[in-house]
Amino acid sequence: MNSTPAPTTRLAVSADRAAGVLLGLASGDALGAGYEFGSPLPDDAPVGMIGGGAFGWAAGEWTDDTSMAMPIARAAARGADLRDESVLDEIVAAWIDWSRTAADVGVQTRQVLAEAARNGGTAAAARAASRTLHERTGRSAGNGSLMRTAPVALAHLDDADALADAARALSSLTHWDDDAGDACVLWSLAIRHAVLTGQLDARIGLAALPTERRERWAALLDDAERRQPRDFEHNGWVVEALQGAWSSIHHARVASGGEAASAATAVAVASTATQQGAAPIPAAVLRDGLERAVRGGRDTDTVAAIAGGLLGGALGASAVPSAWRLLVHGWPGLRTPDLIELAVLAANGGEPDSQGWPTGERMDYAGFPHRSALVTHPHDDGVMLGAIDDLEGADVEAVVSLCRIGTAQRRPGDHVELWLIDHPEPAKNPNLDAVLRDAADAVATFRAQGKRVLLHCVQAQSRTPSVAALYAALYRGVPVDRALAEVVAALPAAAPQAFLTDAVRRLARP
């Protein structure tokens, strides 16, 4: 039932979209955490990573949704087959260990894991406990397996059939009901399709379901598109959780103008239409979709987490705002860079890329001649502009990185790493405008906090001057052409590419 062509090699998969799966999952989870069990909110109600809620979460802290996905992601990140019984044993053991101190564990999941722990703590013990609970109560279709299914797609991007089998196997460890297994298969295959194509299609996996259940699920998806997230009052049930998540995504996409291209994305459309058959989805759909999921009320963190895995897979980590990236964290002591590392490794069969990213201590930029260029921004003496070698020695409190860096080059605290590629091909920067604006906003946010900021790329030639000029135009009142000219004059090797300066001028227009 291979619904989409597998990549010729795993390294051909978009790292941005792969990383977006886990970052989207965790962002939705953390966004909804402070609103869990609440009533639906008005359409214009602000939503933020406020923390708090029934379990006293810290701002940006994820809940059980992402915590239970982490052992799956860690197994996938070392290239494990998630259908392997020994791998499932490790995942169940990790869940049991987590559940002993976790603030929030679903009632059904807690019962199954407690029984499994009493009987050896293996996958077989969990499976038996899950089946027994279902046979005794007839109720095992909570949303607890769907919420954690996102990393399954990353482990089996090259094999849709293996993915469907793994998704159902992992679901049955705690949720025996067919609805739970079906939902995990549908959603995991939708995430796989999103990572491989950049498109959102919840129906792509219908053929993987038993024939007698396909028509029902197709009707449920149709129903989700007709109704709003708030209409699914029983979203603790896996069916309505999936419907609420898809409703959030569908209505966010409709509000953005569907998949029709705006004038600003016409070039990108032309370059991707042949491959994907549709225009790119605006990056703003990710934030809008997750906020809609939270406004739907009740099990807000789970519905938003489910939606986030799929939205992130389609739109990429580059669509996740830097303000969220800085906040997101959770069990077992992970943050945004860790999620990106796990996701990229999982998508690549457990291996880093040819440059050693994302696990290498330092990126090898030895072949670049201009690796140091530390100067003061001509329009703000609290902003330093630099290159890769300036990263570790700069006397600053915050950093905005516009290129890949190694694990040892990462600064503790306020450090934002953004996905901006110095290449004019539109497919390299599917969220170009959003990333440029986000980078300028990040600099402005740090400056508003009184922090001295380093803005850098590899050589301060193209990306750094472009973002520096956009920051000056948006936040310092400098006319954009003057900002570009004076930033370029300040940096000895600056020669920003036209696709970036064109975008800066576009974004700086009133």
Image (cartoon, grey):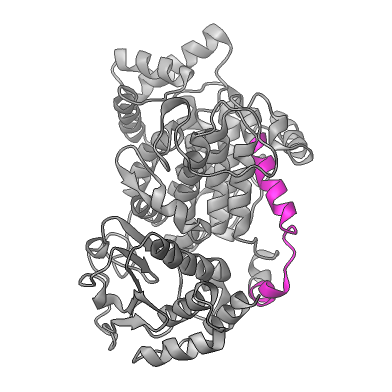
- Which residue is farthest right? 226
Percent across and percent down for residue 397 are 28, 63
Which residue is at 74% across, 53% downward? 254
Is 391 above or below relative to 240?
Answer: below
Total marks in image = 0
Q: Is residue 264 magenta?
A: yes
Pick the residue in front: 36 or 144.
36
Range covered by the magenta-colored residues: 243-271
| Horizontal relation, residue 169 to residue 80: left or right | right
Which residue is at 58% across, 25% downward? 236
Please tell me whether the stretch drawn in magenta is mainly helix, strand or loop: helix
Pick the residue in front: 431 or 153.
431
Is 150 above or below relative to 370?
Answer: above
Percent across and percent down for residue 82 are 40, 39
Residue 211 shows in the view: no
Percent across and percent down for residue 262 are 72, 70
Image quarter for residue 366? Answer: bottom left
| Horizontal relation, residue 221 to residue 302: left or right | right
In the rendered view of the protein, which quadrant contains the C terminus? bottom right
Q: Is residue 24 magenta?
A: no
Image quarter for residue 464? Answer: bottom left
Is 67 above or below relative to 325?
Answer: above
Pick the residue in front: 90 or 438.
438
Which residue is at 38% across, 59% downward? 449
